[in-house]
Amino acid sequence: MKRRGYISPRIETIENYEAAFRGFAEYKERRDNVQRFAANLKANLMELLAEYRDGTGHTSEYQDEEIFEPKRRIVSKLPVRDHVRQWAPLLQTERLFTDTFIRRSCSCVKGRGTHDFINLLRKELYTDPESTWYFVQLDAHHYFQNIAHFLMKERVRTKIKDPKLLRFLDEFIDSFRQGLPLGVKISQILANFFLAKFDHPFILELLGVLSGCKFMLFYILFGGTQGCEFSS
């Protein structure tokens, strides 16, 4: 796998940080915290840019919140500046990570959300009914909180060799007490990137499964008989 360097020069521009704010703030413009950040936007962005250049930035303290839809979860919230700080590197690296996802992975990629997931399932059911008599559901239970930091860092280094960017990513990974936090975009990208190493050999090769798809951590796999495709 080819490793990419010289990414930071594209990250550390004011134009990139302006785009990062626009990306995060989309559909959130009326929120008080977004408006407060935008009231002194240029100075805030210059501060974040300087922190990335100098390697002095640190993730703020997380604020946990319990939610119950669609199921009970603990999400970890950060201030606006942290989201913008994380969006800036993602604008230049997200494609590097998402290109490793299998096509049937429906999350964290533009145009491949819940509708794409449903459409893929519908296509499998209607175009090849004999191969979809049986199915199995898989869920990576408590996945985010069980990602080992040292393994996540090793995985990132299979794709990136830019020292400044690696320092930024290492700081984020180590900023959470255990695993990766729910509720932060960069966590979703990194978690799916980490799991892509499982998707390729296990789902596509070891099981020999040719139909099925995945949404984030939820898998549906189809087979024409009651178990032989899943016996591995």
Image (spheres, helix red, strand yellow):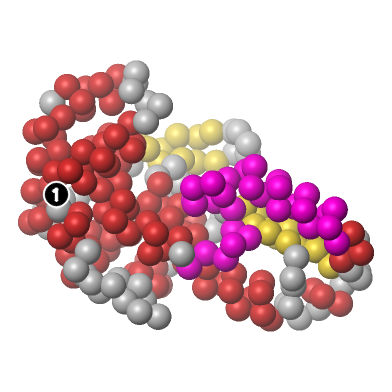
Query: Residue 60: image x %, image y %?
Result: 24, 43
Q: Given the image, on which type of amino acid does mark 1 rest?
A: Thr
Left or right: 49 in relation to 132: left
- The residue that appears at 54% across and 58% down in the rendered structure is 143
Which contiguous range is marked in magenta?
A: 100-128
Query: Residue 152: image x %, image y %?
Result: 39, 68
Location of the N terminus by quadrant is: bottom left
> Against 112, is 168 above or below?
below
Q: Residues within 10 Å of mark 1 (few under 14, many from 20)?
A: some
Mark 1 highlights which residue? 13
- The residue that appears at 49% across and 47% down in the rendered structure is 110
Residue sitting nearer the eye, 2 or 232: 2
> Against 12, is 131 above or below?
below
Q: Is residue 80 part of the magenta span, yes or no? A: no
The answer to whether residue 190 is visible is: no
Left or right: 158 in relation to 113: left
